[in-house]
Image (tube, grey):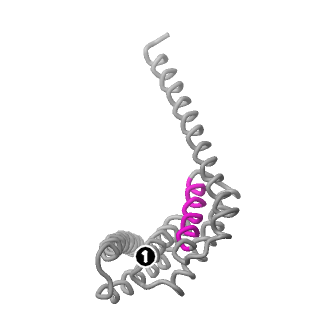
Amino acid sequence: MSIIELEVQDFERQREMVKAYREHIENELKDICYELLRLLDKYLIPTVTKIESKVFYLKMKGDYYRYLTEITTGNKQQKFIEESKHAYKNGFDIAQDQMTVTHPMRLNLALNLSVFCYEFLNETDLACHLAKKAFDDAVSGLNCISGDSYKDSTIIMQLLRDNLKVWTKNQHDLNDMDQSREQQ
């Protein structure tokens, strides 16, 4: 056999090993997500009494469905997208109604929901709107908080602002590309 044929066989073997390992990791991740979602739905969300905890658990539920979305395709992925959207929306509605605009959990949920809208729903305008509103609302309430809450809130606000910069830059870049195509 020539050296090239041996290298090709080696490459194919390595590729198969990487694929098998990736599938193994994905299956482990799926098992963890399913177990956590089961615990959330069966024990935690139905029995929680504190608003902050309920919002946290709903955010967590949205996050774990989002993780499943990242490693699946087809109809199952669509189901996970819908479940994630539903959990985030429920948590977000409660947070908007019952938490201050500077509450770190409310800001964290706005951050995760906006990222979800951008990455999985391809709704850049909605993602930007959610992030900007959460950021602007929190700026107006910063003078009312101090200590750890202030630190936690400002860190999340920085992440919201960073995402907004990236998303609006990407949107402007796409618009520029569209305009240059139209001119050609």
Q: What SS does tag 1 mark? A: helix
Looking at the rendered structure, the kind of residue marked 1 is Leu
Q: Is the magenta stretch mostly helix, strand or loop?
A: helix
- Say whether residue 12 is left or right of residue 37: left
Which portion, as a residue range, is magenta? Answer: 55-70
78 and 173: which one is in front?
A: 78
Q: Please tell me whether residue 24 belongs to the stretch shown in magenta.
A: no
* Dot 1 crowding, Cα within 10 Å, few <14, some 14–19, many 20+: many
Q: Position of residue 179 (x, y in %)?
A: 39, 75
Q: In this view, does 175 lie above or below 77?
A: below
Q: Where is residue 27 in the image (x, y as percent from the top left)?
A: 62, 43
Going 39% across and 87% down the picture, which residue do you hit? Answer: 137
Residue 161 in sight from this viewpoint: no
Q: Name the residue under label 1.
A: 107
**Which residue is located at x 40 percent, y 70 percent?**
174
Q: Vertically, is 79 above or below 138?
A: above
Q: How many marks?
A: 1
Q: Residue at x 45, y 82 (%)?
A: 129
Instruction: Please state the horizontal and vertical placement of residue 50, each as a whole percent of the image.
Output: 56, 76
- Give me the residue at 46% from left, 77% from top: 106
Q: Is residue 45 above or below residue 140?
A: above
